[in-house]
Image (spheres, rainbow, N blue to C red):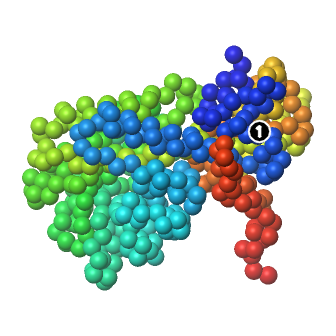
Amino acid sequence: MSSHLLATELLPDTATISAQGELLIAGRNLSELARSYGTPLYIFDRATIINACTHYKQAFSTYYNASTVRILYASKAYISPMLARLLAEQDLGLDVVSGGEMLVAQRVAFPMERVSFHGNNKSEAELRLALELGVGRIVLDNWSELERLTRLARETGMRPAVLVRVAPDIDTDTHKYLQTGHASAKFGFPLSSGEARAALLRILQDDQLELVGIHAHSGTLLRETRPYEECIERLLTLACEIHQETGWWPEEVSPGGGWGIETVEARAMPEIAMLARALQRTVELLQPRLPAEMPTLVLEPGRSIIARAGLAIYRIGATKSTPGGVNYLFVDGGMADNIRPALYGSLYTALAPEHLLKPAEQTYCLSGRYCESGDMLIDQVVLPTLQEGDLICLPTAGAYCLPMASNYNLVPRPAVIMIDEERIDVMERRETYADVLGRYNN
């Protein structure tokens, strides 16, 4: 089967092909959506998001009973007010990493007690905002943050609930930019040096903050359960040491998120149920050593909730065949709306949504419009013969594309819509030149 047809396996749950060979999402023709809303266009399928949330909840309710479970969506993967409202309806919490993400939650009256504030360099203004909004958890990442928040708690008379983020020194089989839990990582108090233990003891001694748990995150695009199992074991071992010395026991423990998705290079992604079973087995083995009940397990999926729900639609503006044998398709987007291929070599495939039944017979390089030689969305992809004006669709574009979007070359950012069979909602309107130029003083 051609790579062109295989790409359909990565599409949202509601994807179908019409009798005319055109791609439909939630029964809607992508070419009609592109005409109505322009390109580049990011489309999110509401049903796929809801299904992903349901799969997480069902997997852990069925295969994990060692403790209660809370699921927080990692907003850094992609967030908007409309998406936050939908996630609240699914009874998920939010993992946020900035004042902006907190304010998105506030804008839609998201239950702030279900919000957890992460990040490795939280400003004083952001910490004050978290206190004002009543954010449920603040995850402390380093000594500066601990001291800053302790001072703010003393000044305001508040006692915010906190977790300590630990760098558990766990190896992960993923890109080095996606590894977040090794000993020299930018995130968290190192476990091996004793800093994580010291941070926990400092909080308990000062008694200005309410220490409710321990957190870690090993990496992202993980496709095996081992990092999660090792992470839970190390966090609970640390908790046991602190309990022996102080009597404190965590209310919650979190191995973070990072569960992967099916991609071009990894088609056989294990089901979420496999992760639930693995954590159940791990906790069962550890339980005899624990001085109290297993704390609430907190998970923070992002990509595995949103990636497959989203796809990017571009229009071909020009084509070029070179003496070196490269056939370019130049599209009206690129690295400014999807930096991932240029940043850490992410691989995508593509399909021609208007010509799904045509034979894939031509190898193309899919290139963006921006003035960088590295602005290549896909180096090689086999598609039907295409021409100027045809559409190109990239599946699994729902995570970490739009959040890292820029106005490189002063190009406005794309429109974003959410669709189902009943309605089309604009999540983000297309930027205009007035929006871009409005930042400048005369």
**Residue 146 screen position, x and y as percent:** 31, 68
Which image quadrant for residue 426?
Answer: bottom right
Quadrant in which the C terminus appears: bottom right
Camera-side residue of 105 and 126: 105
The residue under the point 38% across, 35% down is 59
The residue under the point 47% across, 53% down is 89
**Residue 339 screen position, x and y as percent:** 65, 48
Quadrant in which the N terminus appears: top right
Camera-side residue of 424 and 374: 424
* Drawn side of residue 145 relative to residue 214, left or right: right
Residue farthest to the front, as pictured: 422
Residue 106 seen in this snapshot:
yes
Above or below, 258 relative to 38: above
Residue identifier under label 1: 29
* Drawn side of residue 348 relative to residue 250, left or right: right
* Drawn side of residue 227 relative to residue 102, left or right: left
Above or below, 188 relative to 209: above
**Residue 363 screen position, x and y as percent:** 79, 25
Q: Residues within 10 Å of mark 1 (few under 14, many from 20)?
A: some
Camera-side residue of 148 and 260: 260
The residue under the point 79% across, 25% down is 19
**Residue 150 screen position, x and y as percent:** 29, 74
Residue farthest to the top, as pictured: 1
Residue 363 seen in this snapshot:
no
The residue under the point 78% across, 31% down is 22
Which image quadrant for residue 250?
Answer: bottom left
Q: Amino acid at mark 1?
A: Asn
Above or below, 289 relative to 185: above
Say what secondary structure mark 1 lies in. Answer: strand
**Tally of numbered discs:** 1
